[in-house]
Image (cartoon, rainbow, N blue to C red):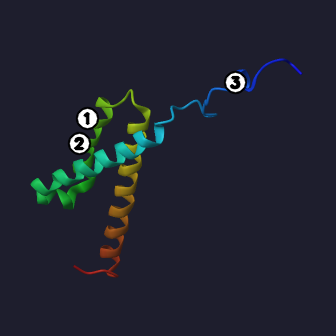
């Protein structure tokens, strides 16, 4: 026996990745922030047809503002990627004639 109690043997909860415990919350916060920014497109309905360009206009300043919070930046970029993929899919469906407006 080492003579140490269980209280002394407890380790501090440190994530193995070295990221803060609220990193996942920050990622979701970043995706929610991008969703709110997407809602701004309702002020300019024509922007929905040019969502790729419109998204760059408000995504770049958001990335610059939150550049020190890696979780929020990751969330913003994940949301931008999802938006890009949905936009490309819808464009492809309309272009091929499988979906008509």
Q: Which residue is drawn at 35% across and 50% down?
A: 80
Q: Is residue 44 left or right of residue 15?
A: left
Residue 82 is situated, as x and y percent measured from the top left of the image, at 39, 56
- Element assignment for label 1: helix
Q: Kindly identify which numbered label has been placed on residue 7.
A: 3
Residue found farthest to the top: 3
Q: Could you say whether the residue bearing mark 3 is in a helix, strand or loop?
A: helix
In the rendered image, residue 73, in percent from the top left (x then y), is placed at 39, 37
Q: Do callouts 1 and 2 mark residues in contact (Cβ within 8 Å)?
A: yes
- The residue lying toward the viewer, choosing from 74 and 94, is 74
User: Alpha-carbon distance for marks 2 and 3?
Assistant: 51 Å
Label 2 sits on residue: 58
Indicate which disc residue 61 carries.
1
Placement of 93 over or under 27, stated as above or below: below
Residue at left offset 51%, top offset 31%: 20
28 or 1, nearer to the observer: 1
Q: Residues within 10 Å of mark 3 (few under 14, many from 20)?
A: few
| Mark in the foreground, 1 or 3 | 3
Label annotation for residue 18: none
Find residue 31 and report its horizontal and vertical position in percent: 35, 48
Q: What element carries label 2?
A: helix
Residue 32 is left or right of residue 50, and the answer is right
Q: Where is residue 77 in the image (x, y as percent from the top left)?
A: 39, 44
Q: In this view, does 14 lie above or below 58?
A: above
Residue at the far right: name it.
1
């Amino acid at each position: 026996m080492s003579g140490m109690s269980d209280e002394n043997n407890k380790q501090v909860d440190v994530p193995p990745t070295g990221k803060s415990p609220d990193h996942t919350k920050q990622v979701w916060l970043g995706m929610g922030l991008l969703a709110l920014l997407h809602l701004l497109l309702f002020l300019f309905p024509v922007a929905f047809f040019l969502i790729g360009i419109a998204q760059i206009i408000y995504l770049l300043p958001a990335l610059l503002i939150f550049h020190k919070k890696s979780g929020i930046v990751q969330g913003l970029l994940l949301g931008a990627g999802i938006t890009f993929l949905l936009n490309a899919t819808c464009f492809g469906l309309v272009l091929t004639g499988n979906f008509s407006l």
